[in-house]
Image: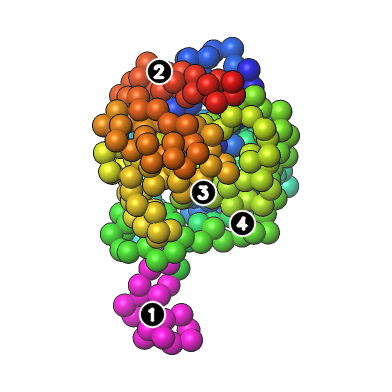
Amino acid sequence: MRIVVLAGGIGGARFLRGLKSAVPDADITVIGNTGDDIHLFGLKVCPDLDTVMYTLGGGIHEEQGWGRAGETFAVKEELAAYGVGPEWFGLGDRDFATHIVRTQMISAGYPLSAVTEALCDRWQPGVRLLPMTDDRVETHVLVDDPDGPPKGDAEGGGRKAIHFQEYWVRLRASLTAHAIVPVGAEQSKPAPGVLEAIAAADVILFPPSNPVVSIGTILAVPGIREAIADAGVPVVGLSPIVGGAPVRGMADKVLAAVGVEATADAVALHYGSGLLDGWLVDTVDTAAVPAVEEAGIRCRAVPLMMTDVDAAARMAAEALALAEEVRA
Ligand code: GDP
Ligand code: CA
């Protein structure tokens, strides 16, 4: 069975670990979000690709859900001693090596997809990990700028766009997000292999990744959304929203920016029946099932908390079962 999964960081990676355990013989292609990528200290950092790679390759900091296990921070401390930041982004010594190798290869002319493949040679994630695009796409968040020109001013009405990582990590999404802008997405092209994998898939899954800044960004690369909608195979998603709140993180803040309520059914309707054939909500959201089904999306309520690999594997099995149900 050929499975294509669109993935962000933690939610995508933990789901993928369950999927691999549920169907060890499946041929899994992951289309990873690169809108979170950021250049720091002259290095290209790809947080979501690395979270998937480290999680599936056994190198992840398990409790934290991102970064390397057994990490030390000597380089960061030395940089800080020179007064060189930002200090708010946690880059450990082991992690630095990944970004150095990546940046070196990119400087030598390799596209990100080739670099990702080379990094995966070491980690052996057991899936084919593709960046959504080899082009530069950077998610920015439009927030109020207290020091900016007054509202109504042609300069932008007292708002400014900041890098997603600054909004998420430094500000912990404490400001209202007025808009989410995947800068560069419109001009980007799917990375080699992305459209081919979608066209060859038997089933396409949306893990419980962030619907706006993870899966939404992947879908913003021209051609990907259309390819999924036209693939003619079941597309099944799992809700990252449980009981009216994200299980982890601040997805509600970016959902609000696109006018979507932080509920399991609102997220399904946001993707829409043009894209989704099936949707899983948590058992605490059983009441949301009818609204999703009325929208033309087959919906089931099952436990959706990835407390361990087995729990994630059961979720993956439920998603595949729902895919077979809609296929029939
Ligand atoms: P990020 O890039 O690291 O933020 O990771 P993703 O976009 O892949 O996933 C983030 C989403 O995963 C958040 O919106 C969480 O609500 C969701 N999430 C994390 N753990 C769980 C879980 O155990 N169950 C469900 N249903 N969602 C989860
Ligand atoms: Ca991310």
> Closer to the camera: disc 1 or disc 3?
3
On residue 314, the disc is: 2
On residue 185, the disc is: 4
Q: Earlier in the sequence, mark 1 or mark 4?
A: 1
User: Do the residues bearing badges 1 and 4 touch, measured as CB atoms within 8 Å?
Assistant: no
Q: Earlier in the sequence, mark 2 or mark 4?
A: 4
Task: Classify 10 Å Cα crowding around label 2: few (below 14), some (14-19), many (20 and above).
Answer: many
Q: Earlier in the sequence, mark 1 or mark 3?
A: 1
Query: Which residue is located at x 39 percent, y 47 percent?
Result: 266
On residue 158, the disc is: 1
- Tell me which amino acid carries mark 4: Ala
Q: Which of 180 and 84 is in front in this view?
A: 180
Magenta part of the chain: 141-160
Visible residue check, residue 76: no
Which residue in the structure is indicated by mark 3? 216
Q: Which of marks 4 and 3 is nearer the N terminus?
A: 4
Q: Which of marks 2 and 1 is nearer the N terminus?
A: 1
* Vertical relation: 100 (above or below) 126: below
Q: What count of labels does the image hold?
A: 4
- Tell me which amino acid carries mark 3: Gly
